[in-house]
């Protein structure tokens, strides 16, 4: 029963994690979700497996021993019950403090896991920018916080369990005193008094186990609260039944600010026509990535609307949204499994010919050179893909998904410039007729686009074709001259 219950907890955790909005997952961090799904679920599982049988066995033992003392003499039984006052006092003191302490410990453990995960996954960046001291300091701070919270729970246990050991002596002393008095009065034999005292000593074992379970339940209860916390996480209110009338994307008066931060979009108006290739350029912090996230339905605008075919993007169900708009960033992930498994995620029914065509479209011919081709296993203990290879697999998944609108946010950043331009042009050919919105720092992407949108300070400052904006001599023209160092090619 315990294993079945644990299996349900794990399955529900995965279901809830996958149902969370991407923005919530990003704010939580991989370390926090990993800790909840491993350490916290394991703590809950241990309790589910062991607590039921242990509770039944040790409760029965305790009741039999208490009943035996009452049978010897009711007055001795009353002494036994009164002697439990110390145990009850210690337990109440512990319970008032334990839950918060274990919740704090779990949060600190998650923060430590997040720091370690981010440092390990960004090892190359840490090395390239000489961030070792900063990362060591951040990890040391997380370790110290985890140590502090563990010391707090350890202190609670160090007070609780010695208090119990002392409290066990009180009922025995009461039984001996009252039993001795009854014996001298001739109301009770010496053997009965000794038997009652021995029963009291034997009672320590089941009580120890039961109270140890109280401590375990506090720890696992805090873990269960963290696991169940996913159910209370903010969720998107999606599920509109209306279908988009067409593939026109309209951004009207869109404003957005991240929690606790300044406004990063200050009222953007933009219409993207079906089949159009739009490049979004501008300096860092201009709001390009934020705009792409709004168009992809990951975040909702604080003010204004973002619609596709007249339907708000954020109101579409996840399944309908992914058929309509797909966002690809420079962040990528290779799942443990074969190359085929990693591609079939996007289109489970795809044939091998379709998989090879998608790989060819993104320049991933290296797959054909692998020992087992599509059946080559990828992962830390198998074939390890490089950053550009992983990015090509992500782009191949997009080709297979074939969305109406593709949003590329530096999706080819890890590729060298020549390969990136070749890949982007190949994607454009494969996705002919689809809308492509590309956030770019390499201006050849803007040159190849139908229109270019220039952003600065959260505002859309220029909009037009490459030639029109170069001829206008504005901000885009200055960017082009700085980047290219020559007149725009025709």
Image (tube, grey):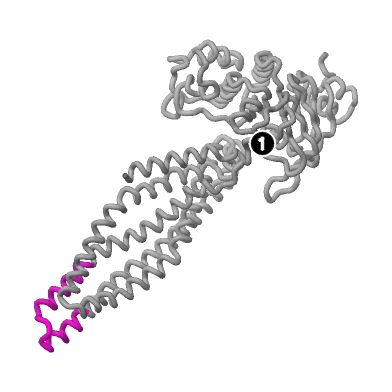
Q: Position of residue 30 (x, y in %)?
A: 53, 41
User: In the picture, which quadrant includes the C terminus?
Assistant: top right
Single out the residue that lies furthest toward the top.
353
Q: Position of residue 172 (x, y in %)?
A: 22, 76
For the point 63% across and 41% down, the residue is 237
Residue 200: within the magenta?
Answer: yes
Task: Name the residue at 58% across, 39% down.
Answer: 126
The residue indicated by pointer 1 is 315
Image quadrant containing the N terminus: top left
Question: In the shown orientation, is residue 247 left or right of residue 93?
Answer: right
The image shows residue 327, relative to residue 101, as above or below, that is above
Image coordinates for residue 365, horizontal then vertical, percent? 55, 13
In the image, residue 256 above or below residue 307? below
Q: Is residue 134 located in the magenta-colored stretch of the structure?
A: no
131 or 327, which is in the foreground? 327
Residue numbers of the magenta segment: 175-203
Residue in the picture at 67% in, 24% down: 406
Q: Is residue 47 left or right of residue 189?
A: right
Identify the residue shown where x is 9% and y is 81%: 189
Callout 1: helix, strand or loop? helix
Q: Looking at the image, can residue 444 be seen?
A: no
Residue that lies at the very extreme toward the right in this rendered image: 472
- Main SS category, magenta section: helix
Residue 415 in view (yes/no): yes
Q: Give the number of marks.
A: 1
Q: Quadrant of residue 182?
A: bottom left
User: Which of the 4 image quadrants contains residue 487?
Assistant: top right
Question: Which residue is at the far front?
Answer: 241
Left or right: where 238 falls relative to 215: right
Where residue 275 appears, x then y in whole percent?
Answer: 73, 19
């Amino acid at each position: 029963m315990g294993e079945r219950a644990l299996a349900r907890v794990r399955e529900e955790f995965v279901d809830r994690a996958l149902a969370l909005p991407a923005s919530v997952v990003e704010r939580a961090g991989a370390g926090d979700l990993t800790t909840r799904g491993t350490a916290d679920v394991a703590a809950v599982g241990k309790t589910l497996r062991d607590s039921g049988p242990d509770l039944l066995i040790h409760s029965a033992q305790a009741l039999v021993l208490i009943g035996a003392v009452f049978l010897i003499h009711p007055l001795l039984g009353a002494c036994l019950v009164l002697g439990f006052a110390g145990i009850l006092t210690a337990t109440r003191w512990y319970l008032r403090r334990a839950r918060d302490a274990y919740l704090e410990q779990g949060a600190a453990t998650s923060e430590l896991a997040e720091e370690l995960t981010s440092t390990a996954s960004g090892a190359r960046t840490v090395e390239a920018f000489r961030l070792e001291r900063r990362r060591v300091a951040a990890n040391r701070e997380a370790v110290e916080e985890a140590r502090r919270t563990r010391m707090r729970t350890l202190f609670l246990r160090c007070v609780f369990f010695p208090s119990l050991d002392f409290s066990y002596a009180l009922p025995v002393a009461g039984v001996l005193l009252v039993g001795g008095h009854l014996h001298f009065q001739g109301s009770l034999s010496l053997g009965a008094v000794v038997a009652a005292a021995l029963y009291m000593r034997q009672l320590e074992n089941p009580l120890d186990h039961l109270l140890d379970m109280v401590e375990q339940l506090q720890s696992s209860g805090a873990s269960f609260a963290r696991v169940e916390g996913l159910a209370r996480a903010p969720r998107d209110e999606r599920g509109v039944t209306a279908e988009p009338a067409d593939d026109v994307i309209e951004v009207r008066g869109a404003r957005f600010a991240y929690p606790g931060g300044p406004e990063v979009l200050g009222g953007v108006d933009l219409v993207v026509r079906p089949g159009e290739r739009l490049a979004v350029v501008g300096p860092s912090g201009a709001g390009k990535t934020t705009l792409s996230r709004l168009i992809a339905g990951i975040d909702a605008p604080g003010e204004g609307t973002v619609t596709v075919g007249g339907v708000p993007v954020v109101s579409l169900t996840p399944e309908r949204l992914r058929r309509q708009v797909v966002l690809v960033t420079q962040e990528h992930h290779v799942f443990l499994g074969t190359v085929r498994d990693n591609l079939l995620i996007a289109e489970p029914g795809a044939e091998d010919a379709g998989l090879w065509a998608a790989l060819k479209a993104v320049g991933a011919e290296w797959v054909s050179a692998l020992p087992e081709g599509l059946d080559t296993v990828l992962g830390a203990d198998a074939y390890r893909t490089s950053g550009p290879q992983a990015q090509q697999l992500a782009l191949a998944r997009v080709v297979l998904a074939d969305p109406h609108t593709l949003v590329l946010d530096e999706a080819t950043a890890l590729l060298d410039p020549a390969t990136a331009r070749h890949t982007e042009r190949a994607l454009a050919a494969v996705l002919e007729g689809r809308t492509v919105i590309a956030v770019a720092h390499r201006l050849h992407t803007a040159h190849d686009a139908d229109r270019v949108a220039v952003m600065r300070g959260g505002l859309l400052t220029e909009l037009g074709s490459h030639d029109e904006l170069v001829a206008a001599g504005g901000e885009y023209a200055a960017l082009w001259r700085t980047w290219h160092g020559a007149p725009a090619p025709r």
